[in-house]
Amino acid sequence: MESKKLLDLTVEAIDERHGEDTEAYDMQGISILADYYVVTTAGSNRQLHAIVNSIIDKIHEHGKEDYRIEGTRDSNWLLVDMGDVVVNVFTEDARDFYGLEKLWCNGKKLELNLE
C-alpha cells in the first residue's frame, strides 16, 4: 500500500475515535525509518486503545496485515509501526512528558482536514 494512502487511512481512523491535537509529519528524505510520523492524544487509556484498534481495523479493511504495536494494556503511550507510517497515541500527560514532536521538527508538518 502506498504510504500516503496508509497515512490517510490512519488519520481517518484517529478522527473517527476523536483523537485530539493530531499532527502528522512528512519525513520522506529525512528519516530512513518511516515516511510519515503521526501523534495524537487520547482522553483516557480506554480511548487510547480504541484509537489503536480503529487504526488496525481500518488498515485490515484495506489489506494491510504487517504492523507492530508497542506498549501494554496499562501504557499511557502506544506506538503503531506500519513501516512507512508510525503512529504514537498518548494520554495527555504522557504526550506532554515525552514531547516527541521535537524529534520531527526537520520534517514538514502536514495540514490535516479533521472534523
Image (tube, grey):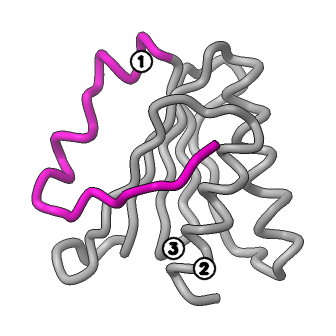
Q: Nearer the viewer, mark 2 or mark 3?
A: 2
The residue indicated by pointer 1 is 94
The residue indicated by pointer 3 is 83
Q: Residue at x 50, y 36 (%)?
A: 40
User: Which amino acid type is marked by label 2?
Assistant: Lys
Residue 114 percent location from the top left of the image: 58, 47
Q: Residue at x 68, y 66 (%)?
A: 9
Res. 29 image quadrant: bottom left
**Quarter of the picture holding the N terminus:** bottom right
The disc, 3 or 1, on the residue closer to the chain's N-terminal end is 3
Q: Nearer the viewer, mark 1 or mark 2?
A: 2
Tell whether 97 sits left or right of 17: left
User: Which amino acid type is marked by label 3?
Assistant: Gly
The residue indicated by pointer 2 is 5
Residue 86 percent location from the top left of the image: 47, 59
Q: Secondary structure at mark 1?
A: helix
Residues in magenta?
A: 92-115
Q: Secondary structure at mark 2?
A: helix
Within 10 Å of the Cα at label 2, are there few (<14), some (14-19), or many (20+) other Cα atoms? Answer: few
Please tell me whether residue 98 belongs to the stretch shown in magenta: yes
The disc, 1 or 2, on the residue closer to the chain's N-terminal end is 2
Res. 25 image quadrant: bottom left
Within 10 Å of the Cα at label 1, are there few (<14), some (14-19), or many (20+) other Cα atoms? Answer: some
Q: Residue at x 80, y 45 (%)?
A: 53
Q: How far apart are the alpha carbons under marks 2 and 3? A: 13 Å
Q: Is residue 86 above or below residue 33?
A: above
Residue 92 percent location from the top left of the image: 46, 15
Within 10 Å of the Cα at label 3, are there few (<14), some (14-19), or many (20+) other Cα atoms? Answer: some
Please tell me whether residue 20 belongs to the stretch shown in magenta: no
